[in-house]
Amino acid sequence: MRKAFFAVVLALMAIFAMAQTGDPVKWTAKLEQTSLRAGEKGRILITGVTQPDWYFYGTKKYDEGPISLEIALNPTDSKGVKQAGALVEPPPGKKHDKNFGIDVEYHEGDVVLALPIEIDAGATGTAKAVISKRYQSCTKTTCARPDATPLTVEFPIEPGAARPEFASASTEVPDQPNNTSMGHSGDAPKPAADSGSSAKDATQVQIEQAKKSGLFSFLLLAFGAGLTALLTPCVFPMIPITVSFFTKRGGESGRDIRGALAYCMGILLSFTGVGLAVTAIFGASGIQKLATNPIVNFFLAALFIFLAMSLFGLFELVLPQGMVNKFSSKSRSGGLAGPIFMGVTFSLTTFTCTVPFVGTLLLSATQGEWTYPALGMLSFSTAFALPFFLLALFPQWLGKLPKSGSWLATVKAFMGFLELAAALKFLSNIDLVYTLGWITRPVFLSIWSSIMILAGLYLLGWIKLGHSDEAIKIGWLRRGFGVASVLAAGWCLAGIQGAPLGKLSGFLPPDPYPNAAGRAKSSGSELPWLDSFDTAVEQAKAERKAVFIDFTGVTCTNCRDMEANVFPDSAVQTQFKRVVRAKLFTDRIGIDDKNAELQTKLTNSKTLPVYVVLDPNTGKPVKILGGSGHSPADFAKFIEEGIAMVEGTDTSAKR
């Protein structure tokens, strides 16, 4: 009786309210794509414009409560089109609703939803999509009667064969308007929509926006990303390796510019050709998994050790006489095969750090789009290779300087020590993939310290190598580098005791060392981290917190950089304490496959690192942040905004 009386009162109030205000929510619908062909998939965007002080309820169902939002394609009245997936809803606000006395999910202001559709095979003429809609809207004190007025969208079906880029409908939340009327209803207003409310990786957003602006903007973005990638930690070891390789080819004429061009061509071919080929075969994460493959890492480690021994003067690298005779008429000192091979090696060793852009770009290739990934990879690799073209020419200029013999031999030997240090990174990758536990962070730093001590003693003249000249006088520059090498060794030893290592941390194994399940109790902090997504969600529900997921990799250099230089910051630690934290490794084949699939499902990205703030009640991300190089303040703000979206609070007044 009480419920019936309450329903009658609500109905009378609704009639009065509707008479004064009209429909509280104005609905419109349109096709998201410019056009669609038979057999293609797309989306219909459905926009609800809510009057001030009004809101409507989300899609969550209630046993006793308001009418939830229901939007679906009416197959009976529609023509030439069918529904191709579930309704895509932006993250709703949450609050306690006094009208029904329960906690509800709701929307207010201007809200855009998306309904995936598919054009029937063989359909021609005009498609007609009739959308069934049912919802209820309320204010703090009154509710309107539920509305079920359908929406109709008609559009011409473009002639022609179905295009690969429309083989699937996007599951991303549509871009939301700026809602100036947000925050009028309820006790816990919903935060205003922003670029992060769509829960997209920042790299994805940049690529999508550039593509919308035209091909030139997209190529410019790719070129700029290539230049930015030069600053990542994976690139640094390749600088001395490039110089040392072309130094070994020193003494040739200026015509060896062909070798420098071949070296850059190897980089371009690797990123563009091999990148697309591996993506087509293995998916967008294939490049990253190839770069972390134990066999590949063992080969690269052996190669660097082999080159280091040559630079130390233990032996000379010479081609078989038969090959020399065969190619002597066309090339010199090994021709172009060597530089091209080194360019491919360079690309492979840097894929881990370049994958935030490369992986996102290649992901579109796995979804049927090839033109933009191919052109983008070409532009990216061109910018990436340009400085190394100059480095490849640099030894040519060194060789022309007077009295270059003695000090150039010293440079070669010092480069050999650096190549040994780089080789340890690849051996560490193998150790991490197989979780052997042999090369932990203290062991890694101890070996590096030993290498730098040996390099310093060599430069100071205290130890000799095979090509060392007893009569050579050690100058102040060589002594300076020797002292710097010894200091670097001490810095590594201090790092074992917890001293900050800056960007150097990116090369090191995770601390503590992960076991076969990827378990790690900390990530640059003493806070505990879970290794199970399901456990994190259940704990977050029990504690009424948001979930923070660190999708990482055991061999990910950028991940270590963030963990060492951003996670320990006090502002970040404060936000970490407000969430349930899960660290999920994704890069070990056969061990991390489930986590890798989860990352793709939640973020539509296969790059590392990527960070997610997730609502445990819906299981959906509310904020996504990819890549490294973020400042602690921005990272803390990212987490705080994600928490606010999950809790349905507004943090603008706090800042």
Image (cartoon, grey):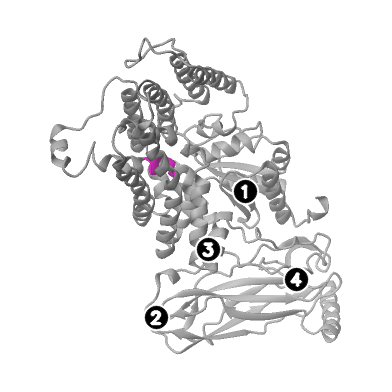
Q: Secondary structure at mark 4?
A: loop
Q: Amino acid at mark 3?
A: Ser
Q: Quadrant of residue 255?
A: top left
Q: Is residue 633 left or right of residue 555?
A: right
Q: Secondary structure at mark 3?
A: helix
Q: Secondary structure at mark 1?
A: helix
Disc 4 to disc 1, how far (Cα)?
30 Å
Disc 3 to disc 4, how far (Cα)?
33 Å
Q: Residues within 10 Å of mark 3 (few under 14, many from 20)?
A: some
Q: Which mark is residue 109?
A: 4
Residue designated by label 2: 121
- Residue 368 visible? The answer is no
Please tell me whether residue 349 belongs to the stretch shown in magenta. yes
Q: Secondary structure at mark 2?
A: loop
**Residue visible at 48% across and 22% down in the picture:** 448
In the current view of this chain or complex, which residue is farthest to the front? Answer: 402
Measured as percent of width and height from the top left, residue 489 is found at: 53, 19
Measured as percent of width and height from the top left, residue 186 is found at: 82, 64
Residue designated by label 3: 217
N-terminal of the two: label 1 or label 3? 3
Residue designated by label 1: 537
Q: Amino acid at mark 2?
A: Ala
Disc 1 and disc 2 in contact, CB within 8 angstroms: no
Label 3 vs label 4, nearer the camera: 3
